[in-house]
Amino acid sequence: MKTANDNFTINPIVQPVYLILFSIVLLIGCAQSSGWTPTVDTYGDPRAQYITQDERECKYLATQAADGSTTGQTARGAGEGAIGGAALGAIIGAIAGNAGAGAAIGAASGAFAGGAYRGISSDDKYKNAYANCMRNRGHNVID
């Protein structure tokens, strides 16, 4: 007995595109630092009344220091990784006898790796810049 799924196949050329898009969406969902704020100890802080204002300003500056949002950096890294991975995968695939499959696998792998690297790197820059900004304004930052 045939089912509706028996007739459904994904074009092998389009399949890597779906894999790349899925990888990018997955990474963007995981890479978000916009809700993070450093923990500030207000005991003995002569500038305690300015914490809210300083957090707002430092958050803005940290976003600039991290080259934009972590989400944007993850997407850029995924795009760059996909291009580099596809090129390398095509070369390896051509040697193995199937350049198309090599390019597809390379693009998907490169997108995931590039997005993860850029997202984590951007998140670290953001957190360091935010904490340093608060410290430079005289606050005791714990983490």
Image: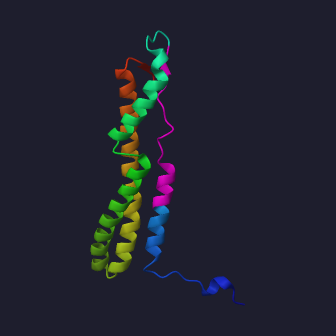
* Number of numbered discs visible in the structure rendering: 0
Q: Residue at x 51, y 38 (%)?
A: 35
**Residue drawn at the location 61% of the way across and 87% of the way down:** 7
Residue 20 location, x and y as percent? 44, 66
Q: Is residue 20 visible?
A: yes
The answer to whether residue 143 is seen in the rendering is no
Q: Is residue 56 above or below residue 10?
A: above
Q: Which residues are magenta?
A: 24-42
Quadrant where the N terminus sits is bottom right
- Using the image as rendered, state which of residue 129 and residue 117 is in the foreground: 129
Q: Residue at x 29, y 70 (%)?
A: 87
Quadrant of res 143: top left
Image position, residue 138 (x, y; %) = 38, 17
* Quarter assignment of residue 107: bottom left
Q: Is residue 38 magenta?
A: yes
Residue at 35% in and 74% down: 102
